[in-house]
Each structure stands twice: as structure tokens, then as C-alpha cells.
Image: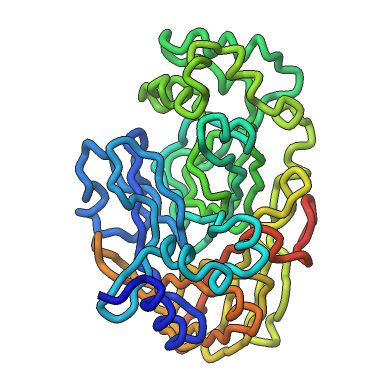
Amino acid sequence: MPNVAQLAAAALSETDGLLRLSPTWVPRSFLQPGRRLKLHPHDYYALGTHRGGIDERWFASTTEAANENRNHDEGLSYCVHGKEKFLLRDAVAELGAELVGDHIWNKYKRWPVYSKFFDNMGPIPHHMHQNAAQAKLVGQEGKPESYYFPPQLNNVGNNFPYTFMGLEPGTTKQQVVDCLDHWNDGDNGILDLSKAYRLKVGTGWLIPPCVLHAPGSLLTYEPQWGSDVFGMYQSIVEGRAVPRSLLTKDFPKEKHDDNAYMVDALDWDKNVDPDFKASNYLEPIVAAGGEKDGWVDKWIVYGKVDGEQLFTAKELTLQPGAKCTIKDGGAYGWITVQGSGRIGKLKLQTPAMIRFGAMTEDEVFVTAKAAANGVTFENTGTEPLVGLRYFGPDAQPGAPMNGAKR
């Protein structure tokens, strides 16, 4: 069998710098699937009820899912070329800058971001993701993330389309410590200290590390840093108990019983910021094209986290018969959410239903060189062709800043 470098080089040569990806499904044992991922109804528990339902699909991922009893390749994307398949992570390791670009390869030696569809029937626990320094203490990476709620996958809002974010101004650290002290007494009441925002389809949010958030039940497209660290601070959600191990798993073992330490790990200023929405809410902003062109490209994730552009994302829409060539500042992962057409030499088709383990024609990884040269998209169908694509750090210096409006 040819090695990964040979397989990847052959695929890139045939497609002018694109890699076809197969679906990557991830279960969560503590959540209930929202059933909008287009999986066959019989397949949401394809890995067994002991593993939990499948409520996530990961895109262009070289990041492993941090699940207990996980499969060896859980969370990792596979490239498919002819009858062969290989991990995108291995292809990046072999070809480096040819795939992810000089800047990212020289600084990170990997593809340091990923995105996912996150799909639940109800809300999930109020939790935070550690920052880089905190995660390093347990051999992990920090995890800022972002949200976008695609209309094509949110025909129904499910049980609770609201997200609690941060803490009410005036909240004290001792109040949160008290909540953690009462973990085993039932609902620890941490949501009493927070504020819920109604989620609006077609908009999004930027979520810095160390900020508490309890995502609601809209299906969410989530560009984020390449990590799966978190700490859950809510003891019961919709009547279901949350194991305390999900609070402590990514903190040093000697701190697992130190609730004050867990609270000090929060970015307090950001959590109690009365202007949190002004800095973190995202409305789409047109980047190129327009109605008269038959296509439009919009920023859906933009801004900086602690002064750094770590990831960005765009939504491209082409009307039937439209064609355009788009140049971008870096490699990206693409997922089609509506319609059919072409990306370069590859066919795009949005599936109505997917069997677990089946191949699709909706996901592609575009190399940095191909993105810089320009990728041609064409709508060959009778409805709009819509795709979402996310980029790595510093790929889009012209992206809008936090708080920009439509």
C-alpha cells in the first residue's frame, strides 16, 4: 500500500490542491442527540448506548475527541482518494506547509483548529474551556471557540434555544464556590447567577476561554481551537446528574477537591462583563459579491480572542447557475449545507440522510496554496448552493473586528 505522503500527493495533484473528507461522527455519553445531523434515525447510537448518542460531526479535524472508552481515531478526519483513505492528521504531518501554509506550519507544526456541528435536544451544562496556560498543566491545549447557527440545519429549535453566558454583574466568587460545594445536593443553582440569551438563527457568538457558557439547543457550527478540554460547573441539567469528574477532568489532580481553585480558573472580568454581548455577539457581514452577482460571501465568525485572530469563518451562497472564484488567505475546511454543485474538480452534494460509516460528497479540505490561487465554485442545481468554511490563525487579516455590525 502506498504511504500517506504518496496518497496525499496523488490526491492533491488530481484535484489541484483539494482533499475529499469523509464524515467524522462523535458521541457524547452525557447528552441527548438533537437529530438534525442528517444521520439515519437508526444510527444515532451506532457506537452503542454505553457510548452515548452521536450529537457532533467534526470537520477537517486533526484533534482527538476526549471521550472515555473512545475509539483510537475518534474525532479525526479521514481523506478519501479512490479506494484508499488516510488521516488528515497524517497528511499534515507528512506534507506540512504544502497543506496548511508556511505560517501555520512554522508556528504550530500541525493544523491547530477544527470545527463541528454540535446538535443537542436540550441545553448542556454551564461550563468553561481552559486557556492555554491552564490546559498545559495537564498536557493539553486551551480552547477558545465560536458559534454560528446555520438556517439550513435549524428548522426546529428543539427544547431550549437559549444559551447562558458568563455571570451576572455583581456575582461574587464565593457564590460560585458555594455552588460547587453543593454539587451532590441536587441542582447546585449556578444558573441562578447567570443570564440566558435567546439564540437567533443566522447569527453567532465568540466564546473566549475561561468564560462560563451553557449552550442551548440550536444546531451550532463551531470553529474552535484544536482541543477538547472543558470543566463543567453545573451539577444537574434537565434532571440529569452531571458527574463531578466532568468538572475536574482537565485540572491538575491535586486540585480536584479545591473548589476555590476551580473558581479562580475563571476569567472573572469577562464573566461579569456587563457589555459581554457587545464584544462577543456576531452578525453576518458581507465580504464579497452581492445579489446582482448571483453569489455572496459573508463573514460569520470574526474578531480576536485576547488580541489574537485564532480562527475565522465564512458562508458562501451561490444562486442556481452562478459561478465564482474565491481567493482566501489560508487553508480551510469546507462543509456544504444546501444544494449541489462543484468546488474545483470535486462534486458537491448535500445529503438528505447519511448512514453511519457511509461516504458523502459534502466535505472538503482546501490547501493554503489552492486557497491563495483561488477556488472556483459552481452551482449546478436548482436551489442555492451554500457552504461554510473555517480558517486557522491569522489567515484573514482583513476580517472584521469584535463588535462589528452588519
Q: Residue at x 46, y 34 (%)?
A: 124
Q: Is residue 85 left or right of residue 276?
A: left
Where, quadrant-wise, is the N terminus in this rendering? bottom left
Q: Does 128 sit left or right of 236 as displayed?
A: right
The image shows residue 246, relative to residue 219, as above or below, that is above
| Total tally of numbered discs in the picture | 0
Q: How is the image coloured?
A: rainbow
Image quarter where the C terminus lies is bottom right
The answer to whether residue 268 is above or below residue 397 is: above
| Viewer-closest of 157 and 327 | 327
87 or 208: nearer the eye?
A: 87
Measuring 50% from the left and 71% from the top, which residue is drawn there?
Answer: 95
Q: Measuring 63% from the left and 36% from the top, which residue is drawn there?
A: 131
Residue 251: image x %, image y %? Answer: 52, 25
Q: Quadrant of residue 48?
A: top left
Q: Residue 18 location in percent, x, y?
A: 48, 79
Whether residue 382 is visible here, answered yes or no, is: no
| 117 in relation to 244, above or below | below
The location of residue 150, given as percent across then percent down, is 53, 60
Rendered location of residue 232, percent (x, y): 49, 27
Locate residue 171: give its quadrant: top right
Residue that appears at 34% across and 54% down: 25
Does the image show residue 162? Answer: yes
